[in-house]
Image (cartoon, rainbow, N blue to C red):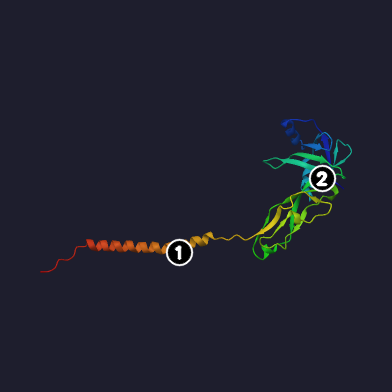
Amino acid sequence: MPTVIEAQLRTPSGKNINRRLRKAGKIPAVIYGPAKQPIVVSVDPHEVKTILHSETGRNTIFAISVDGSDQSNAMIKDYQLDPVHGDLIHADFLQIAMDRLLELTINVETVGEAEGVKLDGGIMDIVTRSIEVECLPSDIPESIKVDVSHLKINDYIRVKNLQTDAKVKILTDPEIVVVTIVPPIKEEAPVEAAVAAETTEPEVIKKGKAVEEGAEEEQKSKTPKPEAKQ
């Protein structure tokens, strides 16, 4: 059974009233719909968080009812978190029709271990973590899976290489890179420092010897020579 959110109508209010609403265990929310005026409501934040933390996340389809009215299908359009505590403080819902196309953001999920990483020590760089798609609500994928096991160093996969269901149309630029395997990072700086130390050390020693020898000669010149016996 789909999740049901029970919402209650509320009058538009300021920050102080919204704070009191949150202290009472509710958060302000707005329901948007095609060719309809937005409906201002309050909802239980725990029900919304349960949806956000599910496998399908904000692309989950659920039922919403306002003050006990007939249920309608909806999705989470947007939400806001408290910047300090991370608590959910506001939500926007979008009423949907199951026979109308939706534009959605779907996460990209890599599958397998790249050959370039496993055998050559490369690093997998996920350049694009989500893409835009268009499909009916009943055809929304949980994620777009991409097999990276065949990728070697400097190989990459573009959006146009992604495999999706025929019912799902990709809207993102097909030339955008999704994932690539970059060469391992070489640590050359310590080696260069060691070489520099090796080349400068003999000069320091040589210079030190020259100073010592010069001092010795100076000392000899200052020592009086014994007078010759008559």
* Crowding at mark 2 (Cα within 10 Å: few <14, some 14-19, many 20+): some
Picture quadrant where residue 120 is located: bottom right
Q: Is residue 214 left or right of residue 31?
A: left
Residue at mark 2: 102
Q: Is residue 226 left or right of residue 219?
A: left
Q: Could you say which is closer to the camera, residue 83 or residue 221?
A: 221
Of the 4 image quadrants, the one containing the C terminus is bottom left
Residue at 81% in and 37% down: 31
Amino acid at circle 2: Leu
Amino acid at circle 1: Glu
| Mark 1 touches mark 2? (CB < 8 Å) | no
Q: Could you say which is closer to the camera, residue 5 or residue 144?
A: 144
Residue at mark 1: 198
Q: Could you say which is closer to the camera, residue 210 or residue 170?
A: 170
Picture quadrant where residue 218 is located: bottom left
Picture quadrant where residue 114 is located: bottom right
Residue 213 in percent (x, y) is at 30, 64
